[in-house]
Amino acid sequence: MGRTIAAMNFSPDRVLVSPARRATRTWEIAASGMTNPPAAEITPGLYDFGDGSRLMEVIRANGGNSRVLMLVGHNPSIEELARRLIASGDKRLRAKLESKFPTAALAVIRFNQSAWAQLTEGSGTLIHFIRPRDVSEATSD
């Protein structure tokens, strides 16, 4: 997935990571496939398994002035957060996200607000949704 992120020229300038070993390891693996990845910022509030509302609070409080923010956390909260944030985007991608948001999936959501502290539900546009199996299918073709 890290190589896919790099190939897409998707370069997060800030990465917030749950303190759980599995999440930190996921980021380490993804970062190893990227050129100059930012250091992980271990963020206890991401250790959450709820409806995504706590993650929205974490983004508002910790997004800072980053342009591209990445979260590495847990389901169901990551999936629920994505659903709450997305108001528009490619219908096929949205259907794929609604169908299954597996471990290590990547949702890229674009927002128009000028600060993360202003993040609101339904303010995002889904730009990309990539599952690990999408990457493996693309490389096996």
Image: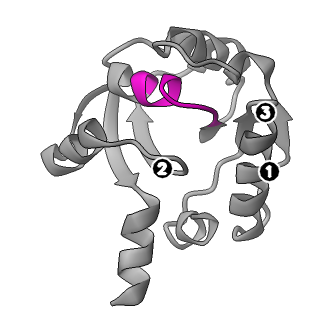
Residue 20 placement, left or right of 103: right
Percent across and percent down for residue 62 are 72, 19
Q: Residue 47 lies in what quarter of the image? A: top right
In three-dimensional space, the C-alpha distance between marks 2 and 3, rounded to whole angstroms, equals 18 Å
Residue 119 placement, left or right of 36: left
Instruction: Identify residue for label 3.
Output: 20
In reply to whether residue 79 is colored magenta, the answer given is yes
Work out whether residue 129 can be spotted.
yes
In reply to whether residue 134 is colored magenta, the answer given is no
Q: Residue at x 62, y 13 (%)?
A: 60
Comes first in the chain, label 2 or label 3: 3
Percent across and percent down for residue 6 are 60, 68
Q: Residue at x 45, y 21 (%)?
A: 113
Res. 38 mark: 1
Q: Can you say whether 46 is above or below 89 in the image? A: above
Res. 106 mark: 2
Front one among 21 and 44:
21
Front one among 60 and 81:
81
Q: Do the residues bearing badges 2 and 1 touch, measured as CB atoms within 8 Å?
A: no
Segment tinted magenta in the rendering: 72-81
Comes first in the chain, label 3 or label 1: 3
